[in-house]
Amino acid sequence: MNIFEMAQIPFNQAVEAMKLDQGVRDIIANPERTLEVSIPVNMDDGSVKVFTGYRSQHSTILGPAKGGVRYHQNVSMDEVKTLAFWMTCKCAVAGLPYGGGKGGIIVDPSKLSLREKEALTRGFIDKIAPIIGEKKDIPAPDMNTNAQVMGWMMDEYSKLTGQFEPGFITGKAIIVGGSLGRTAATGRGVVVAALEALKLKGIAPAEATAAVQGFGNVGSWTAKLFCDEGVKVVALSDINGAIYNADGFDCYKVDEYVQKTGSVVGYPGSKEISNAELLSLPVTVLAPCAMELQITAENADKVQAQIISEGANGPTTPEADEILAKKGVLVVPDILANGGGVTVSYFEWVQNLYRYFWTEEDVIERQNALMRSAFKEVVAAAEKYGVHMRVAAYIVALSRLIEAMKIRGIIH
């Protein structure tokens, strides 16, 4: 089973629960458009290397496609299609006027010079330019891309169109139209989702403990914002390993340590553990914020957390979902919990369209309100249909997509 097929299992369960027509299911399940491009780059050694890039526009039923661009040696069309599908559902759950998109380039960016990376970025935009734009498809950062890469993309697209185009892309630096509050947005969403789950279980944040897998942008902000809310963060990890302290970490100080050393491993006063051990700790909340496929049929029975708030895309397999549901673990699924990033990307897009910018307090308040509302809708759907939260999130997404298709006349 590839990742695209895996992603559609809870989607199909939602289709079955809602008793939807097969034709309606097929419209939503399949991408509207996929594009594969070849990008020639003049390398620093004088050679020419051709890279392969992808863009999948899964849906434009609710609005323009929206989704990041990742640079990684394992990028594939299946992965990009899956991530675009998740983006469609994520935007629909949050009630955003977006469809789903995703892009990627097969490359190990650590092996490129800054000039080569810029040339690759501009070349990619040149090739996908006909299908993107602020009213068609809006890219954003993803794995191994950042505000600088978005700046190059915006500049290249602005050159192609002959005008300043900040609304064509999100995740930019503040100076060229980025939004305050964007950097922490995905992590903030993971924490807001976890806090709502704690409320459901009647647990005060000050009584809760948390383990956060991954200490990149999402994981580090998840950990720091947990600390701000009074949740005791007892375990952290990155690609090099994991650390534990029963008394909890000051996650801002851990972040300072990581900026100096490059890893959480070796943080003073911590005990080194494995990533596998982190996933099985007896904590209140487990936040997987690293890669997909981390909680599987092989380790789900060892999970002792009461709540899982998913910061990564697809960290839990369908088989693991069933095991966790039987154990009574409340899983806040990725398409709900990590929707904070795209929510604030939407705010950035709106600000770009109006050329009017909000305060960080405004951004945070609006994000929190949208995410709490989405959480309540998913809980209501779970209760109505007698399903767990992941299937319920897809039911909420499907309900919105179907309503829009009927209004547009796509279905009758």
Image: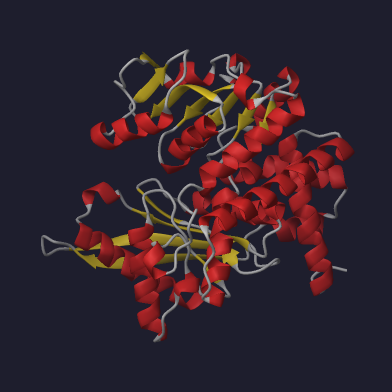
Q: Measured from the top left, where is residue 373 in percent x and y?
A: 74, 48
Residue 378 appears in the picture as rendered: yes
Residue 289 appears in the picture as rendered: no
Q: Quadrant of the N terminus?
A: top right
Could you tell whether 317 is left or right of 103 in the image?
right
Q: Nearer the viewer, residue 31 or 88?
A: 88
In the image, residue 70 sits, relative to residue 282, either above or below, namely below
Kindly identify the residue that appears in the image at 47 percent across and 67 percent down.
Answer: 169
The outermost residue toward the bottom is 162
Q: Measured from the top left, where is residue 322 in percent x and y?
A: 71, 26
The outermost residue toward the left is 45
Q: Quadrant of residue 216?
A: top left
Could you tell whether 95 is left or right of 118 in the image?
right
Total numbered labels: 0
Q: Nearer the viewer, residue 113 or 352?
A: 352
Q: Measured from the top left, where is residue 274 in percent x and y?
A: 41, 18
